[in-house]
Image: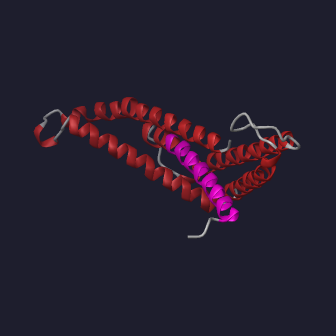
Amino acid sequence: MSKPSRNDASNAFIFEGIHIAEAALRMALKNRILVESIGEGHDFDPSSFIDEAREIMLGLAQEAHDSAARVAEQRKSAWGLHTKSRGTHDYRDRDTGNLRRRGREYKRVAKELERRAGDEAELLRIIEQAREAAWEDVAANIASTLKLVVQRPDLDADYAQMREARMEALRSVDLTALAGQQRKRAKAVRKAARKAGG
C-alpha cells in the first residue's frame, strides 16, 4: 500500500474543514428552525433563512482566513529557530514548510466557503438538511414523550380540550430544552473546528 501524498493529506484537511463548517452552519440553522418554525408557529420558508446561512458561512470563511493569518505569523516566528521545541505549537525552522502548506489549506477552505456562501442552491441544500435534522429532533422528542405519557384520543374524554395545553407545553418546555441542547452541540462543533485549526 502506497503512502498518502502531501496532496492527499491537503485535500483531506480541506474536505474536513468544509465538512466542519457545514456542520456548524446546519446546527445554527436547525436551532433557528426549531425556534421560529416550530416553537413560534411560523410557516417554514427556506428562502427566509438564506441571508442568515450566507452570513454564517462568510463568518466561518473569515475564521479560516484568520487561521491562515495566525499560521503565517507562527511561520515567521519559527523562521531561523533551530533549538529544541518545547511543545506542540512551539514551532521551529524545520516546521516552516508544513506551516506554509497549512496556511494555503486554510486559504483554500476560506475560498471554498466564500464560493458556497454565494451559491444560493448550495445554501438551500444546507437549509433543507437543517430542516430535516430539526424535524428528526422533534420527532425523536415526541416519540420519547409518547413513551412516557401515552395519550389516545379514543380513551381520553378530555383529549381535544387538553390538546392545546399539550402543544403549548411542547413549544415552551420541550422545544426550549431541545434548542438548549442544540446550542451546546453547536458550541462543541465550533470548539472542535477551532481545535482542528490549531
* Colour theme: secondary structure
Judge left or right: residue 4 versus residue 98.
left
Q: Position of residue 50 (x, y in %)?
A: 61, 51
Q: Residue at x 41, y 31 (%)?
A: 177
Q: Against 33, is 120 above or below?
A: below
Please check the rendered image and state whether residue 157 is part of the magenta-colored stretch, yes or no.
Answer: no
The residue positioned farthest toward the bottom in the image shown: 1
Of 142 and 111, which appears nearest the observer?
Answer: 111
Of 152 and 119, which appears nearest the observer?
Answer: 119
Query: Looking at the magenta stretch, what is its main secondary structure?
Result: helix
Q: Quadrant of the C terminus?
A: top right
Of 27 and 78, which appears nearest the observer?
Answer: 78
Q: Residue at x 16, y 41 (%)?
A: 152
Q: Position of residue 132 (x, y in %)?
A: 44, 53
Q: Against 177, is 138 above or below?
A: below
Q: Residue at x 66, y 57 (%)?
A: 14
Q: Position of residue 187 (x, y in %)?
A: 55, 36
Q: Which residues are magenta?
A: 5-31
Q: Against 5, is 69 above or below?
A: above
Of 197 and 167, which appears nearest the observer?
Answer: 197
Q: Position of residue 56 (x, y in %)?
A: 65, 45
Q: Quadrant of the N terminus?
A: bottom right
The residue positioned farthest toward the left in the image shown: 155
Judge left or right: residue 69 versus residue 53.
right
State how many labels appear.
Answer: 0
